[in-house]
Image: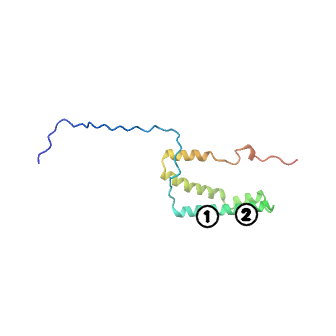
Amino acid sequence: MAAPVPGPAQTSKITIWAEAPALELNRPMDMSSREIRLPLSEVVAVLQDLNEFVVSLDRLGSRQASETADEYTVGKFIADWDVARRLARARGVISVALDEQLGEDENAEIDALCEQGRFYGTDIATTPTDQSS
């Protein structure tokens, strides 16, 4: 079999034009169809914590409405049941999954969305007023 003879390179006379998509800055990411995977054991642990908090806070709210519990009772529940740490753990489970499965830009966008939340103590309306008159 003979080797091909080197010669001038052939060029194609077919030109394919494709319009480049416009760069969209600050375009919100489409989260409607995205999926994030979490280990089932982690999901169950988070759901157990959240269920305990929802049911317990509902019961505390009912007790407050019937005047058999006060702010001290709610504060004691939060401290005794280690609510802050357990909620931070739940947030961590989700954050780790997002960090592992999304890109840096997507995670930055999610972080920015989370910073837009309502936080106790940042609004003048949430500051207790003196009612001792």
* Coordinates of residue 4 in the picture (x, y in percent): 15, 43
| Residue 112 image point, x, y percent | 58, 44
Q: Image quadrant of residue 6?
A: top left
Question: In the figure, is residue 26 to the left or right of 2?
Answer: right
The amino acid pointed to by label 2 is Arg
Which residue corresponds to the image point at 50% horizontal and 44% vertical from the top-left? 105
Residue 34 rendering spot, x and y as whole percentages: 50, 52
Could you say which is closer to the camera, residue 51 or residue 129?
A: 51
What residue does disc 1 label? 48
Name the image colouring: rainbow
SS at mark 2 in the image = helix
Q: Secondary structure at mark 1?
A: helix
Mark 1 belongs to which amino acid? Gln
Give coordinates of residue 127: x percent, y percent.
75, 46
Front residue of 99/21: it is 21
Residue plotted at (51% across, 51% down): 99
Residue at 74% in and 60% down: 61
* Spatial separation of the CA atoms under disc 2 and disc 1: 17 Å
Q: Determine which residue is flagged by label 2.
A: 59
Of residues 34 and 130, which is closer to you in this image? Answer: 34
The relative height of residue 127 versus residue 64 in the rendered view (above or below) is above
Residue extending furthest left? 1
The circle on residue 62 is none
**Nearer the N terminus, badge 2 or badge 1?**
1
Q: Residues within 10 Å of mark 2 (few under 14, many from 20)?
A: few
Report if the CB atoms under discs 2 and 1 are less than 8 Å apart.
no
Left or right: where does residue 78 sit relative to residue 3? right
